């Protein structure tokens, strides 16, 4: 009688959500492979990550594209339908992204990563915002329990959706084990492969408005105009509403100082972090902010926005700025860029901060939520 994990985000390669789903599922299966089954919606291009595909646990799928499946699940919830035949023998169902299967006979856990569409509607496509505004309050009501990846996200759920505080448990994410300090020869090889500068700041994430790259480019332009040769490496594929960002990155005042390798696979990303003098996370909002931990785990100083969940993740090891203030952003970057001793201190502090988070800890705390959920259902 398995616990089902909905790993659709991992099967569809959905950036941060996919990384969370794959990492948590792998950590849970490592603890108890006999207790779980995997579920995901599939189309012609869908494939599980290699680690999950080789896990040999039961897998159930439904053949449906991403958008049709989201609509079917929402309509099923509205109709109080039961999709239990898709997950036979289910004892508990965990939705690892913002889509909760309607089930009548089993408790459910929903992970909520953020409420960006509600807080910053201008940063989402209209139809996606419409769907999430309509569906997420319903999913949150129907879930037996909710996991939030940060205290910030929990607070938003309580404040904006009226979710009872005792229904939500904060269980943080972690950097994957592959993120660790990298030998100089590997850094040099990756630098040559992607044409990276000798010194650079790096920012990592899907190119979308909330990543705040327009202001980051403005900050780099101001630093360079003041005589500081800051170079920026922008790692990540375009996501949505990215035209303004790409146009700003291509303007003459920064174009020569910006390198865009696009998407970088996980096997190369630690060396890209490790080769950087600092990592900048300029987002106006993050539900968790995984690049903060990834960079720190690689020994890279982090300069980031002091808003949303980022101070929870970076702790005292990061340096912070106001993401709406270009001058403050430039000040924070320059202070670390120009001070080698400070970078050394931040590297040591960052490694210690990243070590406080692990997927083993996340799995253990998630299992505790499962026990509470099932005990509450059976009492």
Image (tube, rainbow, N blue to C red):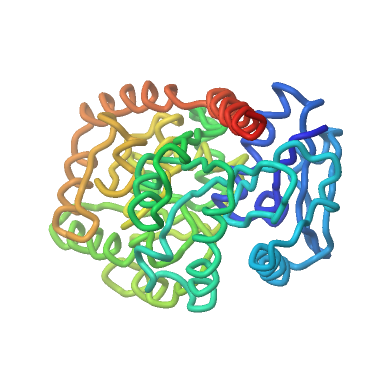
- Which residue shows up at 70% across the image and 53% down it? 8
- Residue 362 in which image quadrant: top right
Q: Is residue 130 above or below residue 112?
A: below
Image quarter where the C terminus lies is: top right
The single residue placed furthest to the front in the displayed view is 379
> Compared to 139, does 191 lie above or below?
above
Residue at 37% over, 21% down: 352
- Front in this rendered view, residue 249 or 377: 377
Residue occupying the point 20% across, 53% down: 322
Q: Residue, x 33% and y 22% (percent of image)?
A: 348
Residue 133 in the image: x percent, y percent? 48, 68
Q: In the displayed structure, does residue 105 sit left or right of residue 315?
A: right
365 left or right of 29?
A: left
Task: Name the spot of residue 149 as percent of width and height, x first.
Answer: 46, 41
How many numbered discs sit on the rendered protein?
A: 0
> Is residue 323 depicted above or below 311 in this figure?
below
Is residue 177 visible in the rendered image? The answer is no
Q: Quadrant of the N terminus?
A: top right
In the rendered structure, the answer to whether residue 138 lies left or right of residue 61 reads: left
Q: Position of residue 258 (x, y in %)?
A: 38, 60
Residue 10 visible from this viewpoint: yes
337, above or below 33, in the image: below
Of residue 181 and residue 57, the one placed in the foreground of this image is 57
Name the foreground residue: 377 vs 29. 377
Residue 307 drawn at (x, y percent): 27, 49
Q: Quadrant of residue 292?
A: top left
């Amino acid at each position: 009688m398995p616990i089902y994990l909905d790993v659709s985000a991992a099967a569809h390669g959905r950036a941060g959500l996919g990384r969370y789903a794959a990492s948590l599922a792998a950590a849970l299966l490592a603890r108890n492979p006999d207790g779980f089954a995997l579920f995901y919606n599939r189309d012609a291009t869908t494939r599980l990550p290699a680690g999950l595909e080789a896990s040999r646990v039961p897998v159930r799928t439904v053949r449906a594209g991403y958008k049709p499946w989201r609509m079917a699940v929402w309509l099923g919830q509205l109709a109080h339908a039961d999709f239990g035949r898709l997950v036979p023998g289910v004892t508990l169902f965990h939705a690892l992204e913002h889509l909760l299967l309607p089930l009548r006979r089993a408790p459910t856990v929903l992970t909520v990563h953020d409420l960006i569409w509600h807080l910053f509607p201008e940063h989402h496509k209209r139809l996606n915002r419409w769907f999430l505004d309509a569906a997420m309050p319903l999913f949150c009501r129907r879930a037996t329990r909710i996991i939030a990846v940060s205290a910030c996200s929990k607070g938003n759920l309580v404040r904006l959706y009226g979710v009872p505080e005792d229904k939500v448990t904060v269980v943080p994410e972690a950097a994957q084990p592959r993120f660790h300090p990298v030998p100089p020869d590997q850094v040099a090889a990756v630098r040559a492969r992607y044409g990276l500068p000798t010194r650079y700041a790096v920012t990592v994430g899907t190119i979308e408005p909330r990543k705040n790259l327009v202001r980051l480019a403005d900050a780099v332009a101001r630093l360079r105009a003041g005589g500081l040769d800051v170079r920026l490496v922008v790692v990540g594929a375009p996501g949505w509403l990215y035209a303004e960002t790409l146009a700003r990155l291509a303007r003459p005042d920064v174009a020569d100082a910006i390198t865009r390798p696009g998407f970088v696979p996980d096997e190369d990303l630690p060396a890209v972090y490790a080769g950087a003098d600092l990592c900048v996370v300029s987002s106006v909002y993050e539900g968790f902010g995984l690049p903060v931990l990834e960079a720190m785990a690689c020994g890279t100083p982090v300069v980031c926005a002091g808003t949303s969940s980022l101070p929870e993740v970076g702790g005292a090891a990061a340096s912070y700025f106001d993401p709406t203030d270009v001058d403050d952003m430039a000040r924070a970057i320059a202070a670390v860029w120009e001070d080698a001793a400070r970078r050394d201190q931040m590297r040591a502090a960052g490694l210690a901060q990243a070590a406080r988070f692990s997927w083993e800890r996340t799995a253990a705390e998630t299992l505790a939520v499962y026990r509470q959920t099932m005990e509450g259902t059976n009492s």
